[in-house]
Image: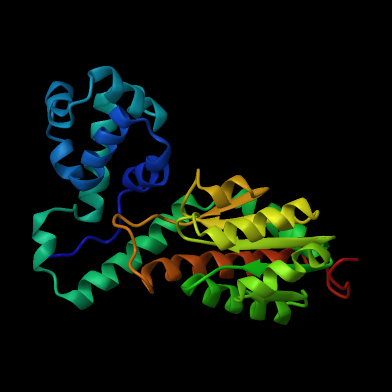
Amino acid sequence: MTPSKATPPIIVRLQSRFAELPPALARVAKHVINYPSETTMLSIEALSRVTESGQASIVRLVHILGFESFRAFKLALAAQCGASGGRGAEDTTVDEVDRLRREMSESLDGTGTLLDRAALQQAAQAIVLSRHVNIYGGGVSAMVGDILAAKLLRAGIWALSYGDNNIGLEVVGPVSRDAVAIAISDTGTTVETVRLLRAARAAGAITIAVTSGRSSPVAGQADLVLLTAPIAQPPSPGFVTTLVAQIFVAQALVEAVASWTVPGMAPGQ
């Protein structure tokens, strides 16, 4: 069996919008995400019955995705499933190493699709023009924060990563003036990270969120959102697949910063 090479872009888009969909549309989206190849063979009437959602809800969902009709949506999905090798029950025969490789590859491909290039450049410009950068995150996201801070320091940007939330909260006010605050959270719901970004924003920082939660609390506190691809199932503690996508965004941000830095000019000048 040839394992899938990438999650179809339509599936990535549905995953990123899933949390903000009303129940009827969410049921349709869930079926498409879990059974994309099967969906391409269903009529709109059949999909309506399977998902217990009205046909109008299905049409509304495909319009949200940018398709004029359900037929156009199915054709695009079928083409993408064919290109990616599809997803189905046969995936259960893949050994654990290959499953992990596939999940990480899909996470990178999905993040590359979702990452807003304009927002990335705006974030890089803000970092170059700021006095310093403060980075917040918990768990594995804190590890990514440490990596990002180290890379920004090497690029000539003063950056600190606050893995200790208590210290972060104690100094968030004075260190946030004329600064950029970056919160890293896969789901975007980590209470301490959201609290830190909210406080930084209130103190005057330009705020950036690196998250898969387009409509999450942390995104709601951000001036700019850099999206990572969401995973199909809720992560367990220490889950590393999300870390790969976050490192990808961190490296993309560092390279964008380098493109904004003027030779011979110190950051903030």
Protein image colouring: rainbow
**Horizontal arrangement in the rendering, residue 241 relative to residue 131 (left or right):** left
The residue lying at 45 percent from left, 56 percent from top is 187
- The residue lying furthest to the top in this view is 56
Q: Is residue 69 visible?
A: no
Residue 264, horizontal then vertical, whole percent: 88, 75
Residue 137, horizontal then vertical, whole percent: 56, 68
Which one is nearer the viewer's eye here, 202 or 103?
Answer: 202
Which one is nearer the viewer's eye here, 151 or 74?
Answer: 151
The residue lying at 9 percent from left, 55 percent from top is 89
Note whether 57 is above or below 87 in the view shown: above
The residue lying at 32 percent from left, 58 percent from top is 234
How many marks overall? 0
Quarter of the figure with the C terminus: bottom right
**Horizontal arrangement in the rendering, residue 20 relative to residue 175 (left or right):** left
- The quarter of the picture where residue 44 lies is top left
**Horizontal arrangement in the rendering, residue 155 relative to residue 96 (left or right):** right
Residue 93, horizontal then vertical, whole percent: 8, 67
- The residue lying furthest to the right in this view is 269
Which one is nearer the viewer's eye here, 53 or 201?
Answer: 201
The residue lying at 57 percent from left, 49 percent from top is 219
Residue 110, horizontal then vertical, whole percent: 40, 55
Q: Is residue 77 visible?
A: yes
Note whether 89 is above or below 143 in the view shown: above
**Horizontal arrangement in the rendering, residue 108 relative to residue 174 (left or right):** left
- The quarter of the picture where residue 251 lies is bottom right
- The quarter of the picture where residue 153 lies is bottom right
Quarter of the figure with the N terminus: bottom left
Note whether 80 is above or below 193 in the view shown: above
